[in-house]
Amino acid sequence: MPTSFVPFSIRATVREDHKRSFRTDIERLTGSDRGWSPLDVVKSTDTQALLRGAIAQGVHTATNESLARYLQNRLAADNDIHLDLTVCIGR
């Protein structure tokens, strides 16, 4: 059975205690090979980035908030990346 993917956009915002690593974190997000959700940069500044991606449909894609929590936890666990994320699921 084919897997359904849910498109989403992310606004990543720098955290005060991680300002020095923000650009590096964004590069690591888009440059690394994460099979669970590849990301593309739409626009980026020194304090915010707009990213686009798609993720396999699941319980974590029920709401924008649940997907934001899932992505924040996954990124911190996988890559030690700490950003504030605002997610908008494209339905």
Image: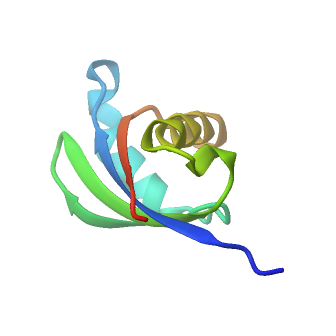
- The colouring scheme, among rainbow, by chain, secondary structure or one colour, is rainbow
Residue depicted at 59% across the width and 33% down the height:
73
19 vs 68, nearest the viewer:
68
The quadrant where residue 55 appears: bottom right
In the image, residue 86 sits, relative to residue 28, either above or below, namely above
The quadrant where residue 85 appears: top left
Number of numbered discs visible in the structure rendering: 0
In the image, residue 22 sits, relative to residue 49, either above or below, namely above
In the image, residue 44 sits, relative to residue 91, either above or below, namely above
Residue depicted at 21% across the width and 44% down the height:
48
7 vs 20, nearest the viewer:
7
Q: Furthest-right residue in view?
A: 1
> Residue 17 placed where, x, y %?
32, 18
Screen quadrant of the N terminus = bottom right
In the rendered view, does 40 fall on the left or right side of 58?
left
In the rendered view, does 71 fall on the left or right side of 53?
right
> Residue 4 placed where, x, y %?
65, 72
Q: Furthest-bottom residue in view?
A: 2
> Residue 32 placed where, x, y %?
55, 62
Q: Furthest-top residue in view?
A: 17
Residue depicted at 43% across the width and 65% down the height:
91
Residue depicted at 45% across the width and 36% down the height:
65
71 vs 90, nearest the viewer:
90
